[in-house]
Image: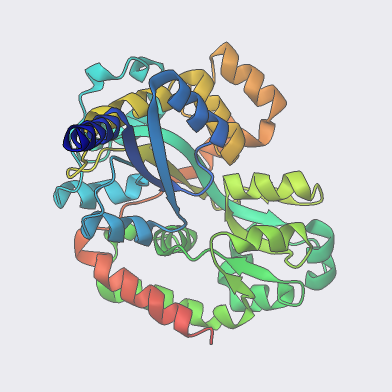
Amino acid sequence: MKVLLALLALLATIAQAHAEQVVRVYGWKDYLAPDVLRDFQQQTGITVDYQTYTSTDELRQALSDGSHYDLVMPSHFMLEQLIEEQRLTPLDTRQLTHYAELDPWLLTILAGLPQANRYAVPYLWGSTGLVIAPDLAQASYGAPPPNSWKLMFEAAETERLSTCGVAMLDASDETSSVLLNYRGRRLSRITNRQLIKQLDGLKAVTPFIRTMNNWDFVDDLINGKLCLAMAWSGHAVRAMQDNPKLVYRIPEEGAAIFIDTLAIPSDAANPQLAYRLLDFLIDPPIALRNALNSRFYAPLPNETPAMQSFAKAHPAQVLTTDQRRRSYLLESVPTSQRKILDEAWQDLKRNRY
């Protein structure tokens, strides 16, 4: 009898383990609202194990070391390399009932990248611009600061703001692309030697940079410890909500647009569960909830009634036609340049100390 009871208990445990379905997600911090995850679990019975990162390098490392996530959020400029390395699996969009409701403009942009639409769908997206505290900045600068990237990339200009605090993103792709665009160059058309030279030129700027990170600077902006920061639009909106004196600007020379996507890794243990979560996340009401939570832009057409209402209530989370016109898609770093860029970036960061 004891043997039988033990066997029954074991079978019950095994059955319970099989009944519990878990989808493992690796995504940007604060990109999925907790109540959205709860709703998904209540509707499907599937548990979401959501782990987060704050830099693209962390995602690259996770995909290369066999972490076996089911759904990931690679930025568009990562896709070409990840596809070449066979880190992602092709998507069957017929399994996505809400695919047709995505913004055609975003799909068209992704279509310009080799095979991107075959492996990923657009999710939250944004721009990389400047957050400024006008009063603090003007007092330090000695005049109203121009709406220009030279505040971040010209040492003499950055020094004038250094007393009130300047922050730069720890993001090699975004920073190098914006820097080269400011200097009239393109990342995709520059030699390795020229790339190293351009980043090496920032060594004159970094001594005047108070902080170089992708998250903590938001609190510093809110608390008045910084007067200027290079920032992703969602983080800018987050700071502005807690400090209304802050302003987010698309510089006159333009800003980089980035698209964070949803993709299924090639080594995903539960791809079918990933499809269910992916489709849930691009359902327009859910996408708007996550956009509101993250403060980034939603992957939906501006012309829809839902987006028009959203834009009226949250204007900072919808890029205007003029702002789109002054922006460009952040370029992808060729695989051949990845190592060169990473080494040059690490050398630049070491120069601060």
**Residue at image location 53% in from the left, 63% down from the top:** 169
Look at the image and tell me whether residue 32 can be seen: yes
**Residue at image location 15% in from the left, 50% down from the top:** 84
Looking at the image, residue 305 sits to the left or right of residue 284; the answer is right
Look at the image and tell me whether residue 103 can be seen: no
Count the numbered circles shown.
Answer: 0
Of the 4 image quadrants, the one containing the N terminus is top left
**Residue furthest front as drawn:** 1
**Is 132 placed above or below 19 here?**
below
**Residue at image location 41% in from the left, 59% down from the top:** 177
**Is 133 placed above or below 265 here?**
below
**Is 17 placed above or below 241 here?**
above
**Residue at image location 65% in from the left, 57% down from the top:** 218
Where is residue 123? Give x, y as percent.
42, 34
Where is residue 237? Give x, y as percent.
66, 44
| Pick the front one: 170 or 109 | 170
Looking at the image, residue 219 sits to the left or right of residue 85; the answer is right
Quarter of the view holding residue 35 = top right
Looking at the image, residue 272 sits to the left or right of residue 159; the answer is left
**Is 68 placed above or below 150 here?**
above
| Pick the front one: 333 or 252 | 333
Where is residue 119? Give x, y as percent.
23, 35
Quarter of the view holding residue 94 = top left
Q: Report the colour scheme.
A: rainbow
Where is residue 52? Give x, y as percent.
44, 51
